[in-house]
Amino acid sequence: MYSVLVEMTVAPTDHDAYVAALTAHAARCLANEPGTLQFDLIQDDSDPNLFCLYERYADQAAVAAHVQGESMSVHREVTRGLTATTRIIRGEVLNAG
């Protein structure tokens, strides 16, 4: 099992567009990418413009398929310029359960 965590901040003026884009992206990934097992968008309780994506994949090949897939291409285009900062953590899940 392989996971990706993405922490992002957006400008307050881009908040609604960003949430709509990420919600649609998550739905497309879960519907069309067999190796995508989980795709959650989390909004910080204290900062509504701070988000975390928790993505879980069957393996690294599924991550590669996701990154090269159609949904990711659409996502990049739709969200271009919306994120102020992005931090990505990738790795094997050590305690899958």
Image (cartoon, helix red, strand yellow):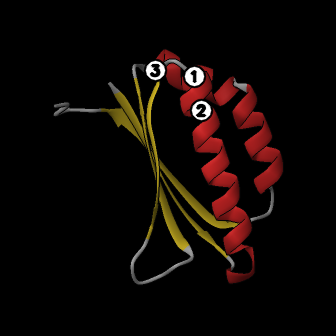
Percent across and percent down for residue 33 are 57, 22
Mark 1 sits on what residue? 33
Mark 3 sits on what residue? 60
Q: Which label sits on residue 29?
A: 2
Q: Nearer the viewer, residue 35 or 4?
A: 35
* Neighbour tally class for label 3: few under 14, some 14-19, many 20 plus, Cα within 10 Å: some
Quadrant housing the C terminus: top left
Check if mark 2's residue and mark 1's residue have beta carbons within 8 Å: yes
Find numbered disc 2 in the image and state the secondary structure of the residue it sits on. Answer: helix
Q: Mark 3 belongs to which amino acid?
A: Gln
Q: Which label sits on residue 63?
A: none
Q: Mark 1 belongs to which amino acid?
A: Glu
Q: Is residue 23 above or below residue 57?
A: below
Find numbered disc 3 in the image and state the secondary structure of the residue it sits on. Answer: helix
* Neighbour tally class for label 2: few under 14, some 14-19, many 20 plus, Cα within 10 Å: many
Q: Mark 2 belongs to which amino acid?
A: Cys
Q: Is residue 14 left or right of residue 65?
A: right
- What's the distance in space between the residues labelled 2 and 1, CA to CA? 5 Å
Q: Is residue 43 above or below residue 70?
A: below
Q: Nearer the viewer, mark 3 or mark 1?
A: 1
* Neighbour tally class for label 1: few under 14, some 14-19, many 20 plus, Cα within 10 Å: some
- What's the distance in space between the residues labelled 2 and 3, CA to CA? 15 Å
